[in-house]
Image (cartoon, rainbow, N blue to C red):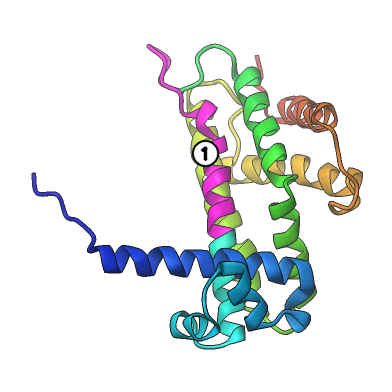
Amino acid sequence: MTTVRTPAAARGRIDKRRAILDAAFTVFSRAGYGQACVKEIAAEAGVAKPTVYNHLTDKATLFREAMAAAAESALAADLAALEPLHEPVGGTGDGVGGDVPAALTRVARELLRRHATAEAWALRRLLHAELTQFPDLLDTVRGDGTRRLGEALADRFARLMLAGRLRAADPAVAAEQFLALLDGPLEARSAMGTRRLRKADLDALADAAVETFLRAFGPES
């Protein structure tokens, strides 16, 4: 098998672009789009201002790319949180052994922990604040990410339904309801991220969401 190696120069350019996007998201989160300046972003990234323009042509492009990168990172973390629903077990084929509630609880707690981070709230606030100027970001940040997370969760629910571990229903609706049971109370209890919730608070929200979800979608038996 031949190993394809990325040239050092290409790796350096990719790393530098990533550093710029991370710095841009930090500065935009702190100052907002209107008040942020490219000079400040360059300083945050530890590069010269012309270097920023060499990688990303203007401030608007920089903002779009920084938001897209942050959204992709958040989605990767969310998909990783679904791992308890993928764990292989012998015989059942549904991936969660004999304890669906425990697996759902692990997923719910991890998703809430990730959705309650400072970075996650910053992404939401920036999207809402700049949506009128950048309406395309609704699809970039929420539309595509929400769809992909929902599809991954629906796939696991469909397997559980086929195995009789959840009530037969539309798995896409079940996934949508599960996520809504998590994010709705989180936004309300934390006042859109302005009030810090303790781990115990997040766990309680997750447990309540799972209990409600299972009342609606638990196996009929």
**Residue 89 among those drawn in magenta:** yes
Relative to 183, 101 lies left or right:
left
Q: Secondary structure at mark 1?
A: helix
What residue would you read off at disc 1?
80
Place residue 37 in its image quadrant: bottom right
Query: Which of 184 and 49 lies nearest the eye of the viewer?
Result: 49
Q: Give percent across and percent down for residue 118.
A: 74, 51
Place residue 166 in its image quadrant: top right
Q: Vertical placement of 52 versus 169: above or below? A: below
**Residue 59 among those drawn in magenta:** no
Q: Vertical placement of 43 versus 37: above or below? A: above
Task: Give the quarter of the figure containing the C terminus.
Answer: top right
For this orientation, the residue located farthest to the left is 1
Relative to 142, 75 lies left or right:
left
Q: Residues within 10 Å of mark 1 (few under 14, many from 20)?
A: some
Task: Give the quarter of the figure containing the N terminus.
Answer: top left
Residue 67 seen in render: no
Residue 159 seen in render: yes
Which residue is at 52% across, 74% downward?
A: 47
Q: Give percent across and percent down for residue 153.
A: 55, 40
Place residue 99 in its image quadrant: top right
* Amino acid type at image mark 1: Ala
Query: Which of 155 and 115 lies nearest the eye of the viewer?
Result: 115
Q: Vertical placement of 65 versus 171: above or below? A: below
Which residue is at 64% across, 62% downward?
A: 142
Q: Vertical placement of 110 versus 22: above or below? A: above
Q: Give percent across and percent down for residue 106.
A: 64, 25
Query: Which of 27 and 111 lies nearest the eye of the viewer?
Result: 27
Query: Which residues make up the magenta segment?
Result: 71-94
Which residue is at 64% across, 82% downward?
A: 39
Relative to 27, 128 lies left or right:
right
Q: Give percent across and percent down for residue 102.
A: 64, 18
